Image (cartoon, grey):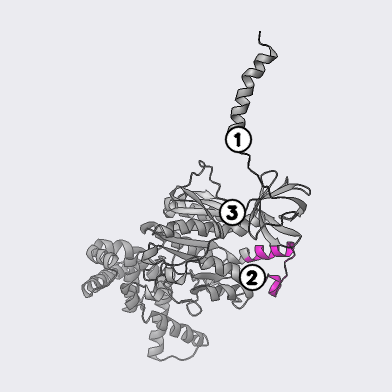
Amino acid sequence: MKTLQDELEHWIPIARRRLRNFDFLPAIEHVGIVDHVGDGVAEVSGLPLTRLYETLRFKDGALGLTFRVDETSLGCVLLANGEKVSAGSQVQGTGEIIRVPVGEELLGRILDPMGLPLDGGPPIVACREDPIDQPAPAIIERDLVTEPLMTGITVIDAMIPLGRGQRQLIIGDRKTGKTTIAVDTIINQKSSNVICVYAAVGQKTSAVNQVISAVRKYGAFERCIFVVGEANASPGAQWITPYTACTIAEYFRDCGRDALLVIDDLSKHAIIYRQLSLLLRRPPGREAYPGDVFYIHARLLERAAKLSQERGGGSITALPIAETQAGNLTAYIPTNLISITDGQIYLEPKLFYEGQKPAVNVGLSVSRVGGQTQSLAIKKLARRLRLDYSQFLELEVFTRFGAIMDDRTKQTIKHGRSIRSVLAQPQYKPLSLSEQTALLLAVSEGKLDDTSAKDIVEFQIKLGREILRQCPRAVSRIENTKELSDEDRQDLLQAFDIILRETTSSGHQ
């Protein structure tokens, strides 16, 4: 039987070895106390070394983000509902900003703003974690926007073209088809190498599910990433959603690939920022928005760019969405975003209610960069399209009063109506480059001027299938060279005559 002396002789050498190997280093913990909490924000004292936008960790494991720093206290936003966070709880400063997983493992996944899966799939094992707030590329690190980003929407690709690395605002009233344009653009990347990242900021769950279902059905879901900060998430989580999505897109950009970033929408993002700022008593400015609301959006959208070859040549094309009230483009947030971006696509309620979908107002829409990237096949055909369409819209106003028209005016009206019919396009059915080229060629040659609107719709339905059957070489050359040769033009014109004869004869039966 072991005595006490035997036990001591056994354990004392072990204890000495452990003490010799133990590093007695000072450990500093930066700990504060929650003064009060509510409405998704908290007031904290006792963290004098905390920096702006630093991550805070509460005792129950919840995370917060420093939003306001004063001499004696700081305000933070909770990144979860934080039911267990209460006054008197301990909170610890981490010295870091929020990091989220990035990498190929995120493709085909649905995430929350913290990078955690929402689709019921396995945990994400990413190659690394990057901070959600990073500096934009410097001027010397950028390159010219030279490559087109095809949306598959004729009115945009012909009149308001986009380039890879551009920032194009989609703006309009509620329920005018803004998200539809963005989703159709994502679907059209099925035939390209572009990675698509969709950020839902403050959207209803049903609306987000509808977008995801459409991409699953019609697009390349395996090359898309969805970052969802829906309406029932905490305000802090909604606020960081676009920054998380941008960081994920930057990974692919820095790998030399092209990414498309859709932010739906920045109007709600600004409202959330205003809400958090007022709750934490930051000084309000115009329309109660804080004075730096322009800066937070500029800082975000400046991260979308085309990088130089030295940086890999990758790009992020940003499609932020903004909502107007009663078509007021001069409101505070819309004017801010218009001045930040490289152009805007304006959707007009009047056109939408008249059945012209997509309801793009060509006169108020502009692309300041994409015209340099437009494929030659479309560029030549669309050269006079915008002018002819604008003239038609002006003349159409006078025809409503029963004015007497000469033959030239009648022809302009007929040609304009055919353009308008061609620019209408069903949802979730983006067109290829060859289909758009053929459609614009038919309009520019006046082939559809004497055709009824019903027959033009039938012509559009048959066009893609028929040109592929009757002139496959022309279709292949247009897709590969992006140009329209004289030989291909003649082949397409002959195909148009056949399609129109079949359409007209079937319509009369």
**Residue 321 image point, x, y percent:** 54, 66
Q: Which residues are magenta?
A: 270-293
Name the residue at 57% across, 64% down.
Answer: 265
Q: CA distance from mark 1 to mark 3?
A: 32 Å
Q: Which residue is mark 1?
A: 22
Q: Nearer the viewer, residue 55 or 361?
A: 55
Name the residue at 63% across, 21% down.
Answer: 11
Q: CA distance from mark 2 to mark 3?
A: 21 Å
**Residue 476 image point, x, y percent:** 26, 63
Callout 2–callout 3 Cβ contact below 8 Å: no
Indicate the amino acid at tag 1.
Phe
**Residue 369 image point, x, y percent:** 43, 75
Callout 3: SS: loop
Q: Nearer the viewer, residue 111 or 493?
A: 111
Looking at the image, can residue 202 be seen? Answer: no
**Would you place residue 221 above or below residue 477 in this image?**
above
Left or right, residue 289 beside residue 470:
right
Q: Residues within 10 Å of mark 3 (few under 14, many from 20)?
A: many
Q: Nearer the viewer, residue 67 or 17?
A: 17
Give whichever of discs 1 and 3 has the lower sequence position.
1
| Residue 292 marker | 2
Left or right, residue 289 beside residue 102:
right
Q: Which residue is mark 3?
A: 98
